[in-house]
Image (cartoon, rainbow, N blue to C red):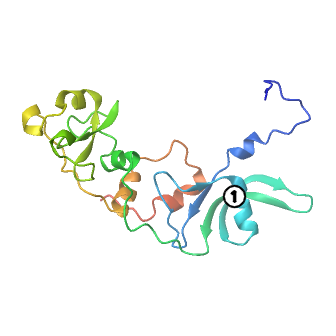
Amino acid sequence: MLQSTHTPSFIRQPGALRDHPALVLNADYRPLSYLPLSLWSWQDAVKAAFLDRVVVLAEYDEVVHSPTVELRIPSVVVLKEFVRPAKSTAFTRFNLFLRDEFCCQYCGAKDNLTFDHVLPRCRGGRTTWENVVASCGPCNLHKGSRTLKQSGLHLRRKPVRPTPEQLQNTGRKFPPNHLHDSWMDFLYWDAELEA
């Protein structure tokens, strides 16, 4: 199907409305997740509010219309029913990088990240939380299929299986690029205050 770069003026472009996500809070008023931040599109937030599945805590100034109803776009919504957090953490590349705070566990670099088996697979190492760490390309290449002792590298932290709470707390250190002002009171209210 061909697409034109020119859009006729009679076709509405609700582009501004695409840019109005809603922060989703669990029934305990905490975000469902911090990284990625639990967000819904404005359409999903309006639908959930209309179906009475959420309570709207904050709204944008913009409104959406149907033939009979005008609604302000929700900015922060809280679920009426509590969603139980996961009891275990999925072993994914993203969660591994999050556990290691997006830095190489050998040199501390934050660029060109990959992952490395501490005990190489060719030596019986398994792909588990306790044997895989974030590593930059140069350190991974330097280590190769050797052990830590053979390569002369040292781990900054021992790799462990994180709990979902640990990942959530680590996720708070990496806020998204855009945080709407109405979200701030709900994102970090339970964080420990600095003395």
Q: Is residue 83 left or right of residue 171?
A: right
User: What x and y, as percent, mark residue 62?
Assistant: 76, 51
Residue name at image x 34 percent, y 41 percent = 102
User: What x and y, as percent, mark residue 65?
Assistant: 85, 55
Which amino acid does the dot numbered 1 rest on? Asp
Closer to the camera in the image, 87 or 44: 87
Can residue 86 be seen in the rendering of this structure?
Answer: yes
Q: Quadrant of the C terminus?
A: bottom left
Q: Quadrant of residue 163?
A: bottom left
Closer to the camera in the image, 82 or 124: 124
Residue name at image x 20 percent, y 37 percent = 106
Residue name at image x 21 percent, y 34 percent = 107
Q: Secondary structure at mark 1?
A: helix
- Residue of label 1: 44
User: What x and y, as percent, mark residue 103?
Assistant: 30, 39
Q: Quadrant of residue 25?
A: bottom right
Q: Quadrant of residue 165?
A: bottom left
Please, which residue is most extreme toward the bottom here? 81
